[in-house]
Image: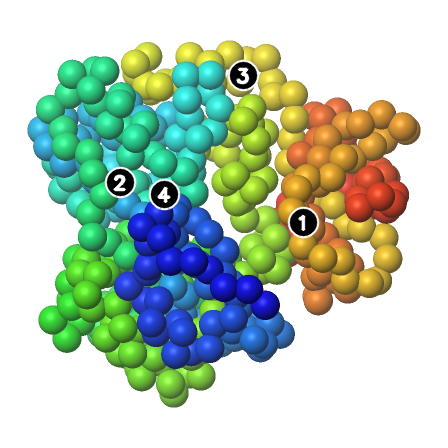
Amino acid sequence: MFSITPSARLRPSPYYAATLAEGVNAFTTYNHMLMPTGFGNPAEELRRLMEGVSMWDVAVERQVELRGADAGRLAQILSPRDLSGCQVGQGKYVPLCNHAGTLINDPILLKLAEDRYWFSIADSNVWFWARAIAAERGLDVQVGEPDVSPLAIQGPLAEDVVAALFGDWVRSLKYFWFRETSLDGIPLVLARSGWSKQGGFELYLMDGTQGTRLWNLVRAAGRPWGIGPGYPNVVERIESGLLSYGGDTDDATNPYEVRLGRYVDLQVPDDVVGIQALRRIHREGPRRQQLGAVLDGAEPTPLLFHWHGIFRAGVRVGDLTNCVWSPRLGRNIGFALVASACVPGERVEIHKEGRVVQATLQALPFF
């Protein structure tokens, strides 16, 4: 057991007090904040997500806001995905890259107005990057972090809970689309999105003083469906093949290596950051690819603190970037970032914690 020393470097979530009341017993750090990762019953927390409905404090998904006459231009300069058809109220998954075509974040872009955009980011300081590019290009745009903190409602029964809160109009909301709304006077953006494949919504709270009240309103509305606390579940995300930026990527990973090539539009303007390098990588072909790995043996293994080498015929061909016990498969599974010459069905060796484990490569997702 250990404690975390409070610091101005570590910002509290608006839902922090509510998660303490729920019995949170584990956190990880993400974007200089604490994200809950356990409430004492992992099997039940997974079951709720897979079969029922779960609510998550994901305030760590910070927003980088672009506001001003050139907000749309900056959004496109930062995005190798074509945004020309993006409408107000629409979100798009975007692989942000540096000038070498290396992935530096994989946010959801939300277009709130012609002159206002949010990047809902993974774990890296994108607003530093966006502000620097804006200044370099001399753009008329303000870049900052607004008071916005997402609360996720995920699982096959999530839609029923959200409809009970806001009305049946939410059932027609398309994936990654959103609407500005309110709940009992609390200002929100409601989006059909979330870091699971079980379906759900995210409530972007736009008043950080209302975190506990919003949590309790959702908790009460979801009681008939058995709602309970949860978090971005590592078992579900690996089984579903969801990328974790920074966990499954290194400082040389490009979108084509981690199954994000379909979100790169090579015809975007030449001034888009990284597009020249991405065109070259596409032309030459990526050196690595992301596959699944099913490890031999029927004993659960601890989660990884670091990557483990993958070998084929005695030659290192890549790394195991994560590993978790899959109850549905009855095996330890993970993502393999391996040479492009590797193929699904191939047998490999994983050098893990001082021992060698046999494994089979396969295509993602596992389910």
Q: Which comes sooner in the sequence, label 3 or label 4?
A: 4
Q: Is residue 40 above or below residue 117?
A: below
Q: Which comes sooner in the sequence, label 4 or label 2?
A: 2
Q: Which residue is mark 4?
A: 121
Q: Residue at point 32% right, 27% down?
A: 129
Q: Which residue is mark 1?
A: 304
Q: Quadrant of the C terminus?
A: bottom right
The type of residue carrying mark 4 is Ile
Q: Assess disc 4: are there few (<14), some (14-19) or many (≥20) residues with their C-alpha within 10 Å of its C-alpha.
A: many
Do the CB atoms of the residues marked 2 and 1 lie less than 8 Å apart? no
The type of residue carrying mark 3 is Ile
Q: Which residue is mark 3?
A: 281
Q: Which residue is mark 2?
A: 64
Q: Which comes sooner in the sequence, label 2 or label 3?
A: 2
Q: CA distance from mark 2 to mark 3?
A: 28 Å
The type of residue carrying mark 2 is Val
Do the CB atoms of the residues marked 4 and 2 lie less than 8 Å apart? yes
Q: Secondary structure at mark 3?
A: helix
Residue 247 lies, in percent from the top left, at 56, 42
257 vs 189, left or right, is right
Q: Name the mark nearer the viewer: 2 or 1.
A: 1
Q: Which comes sooner in the sequence, label 3 or label 1?
A: 3
Q: Assess disc 3: are there few (<14), some (14-19) or many (≥20) residues with their C-alpha within 10 Å of its C-alpha.
A: some
Q: Secondary structure at mark 4?
A: loop
Q: Name the mark nearer the viewer: 1 or 4.
A: 1
Q: CA distance from mark 3 to mark 4?
A: 24 Å
Residue 104 appears anywhere in the view: yes
The type of residue carrying mark 1 is Leu
Do the CB atoms of the residues marked 3 and 4 lie less than 8 Å apart? no
Residue 362 appears anywhere in the view: no
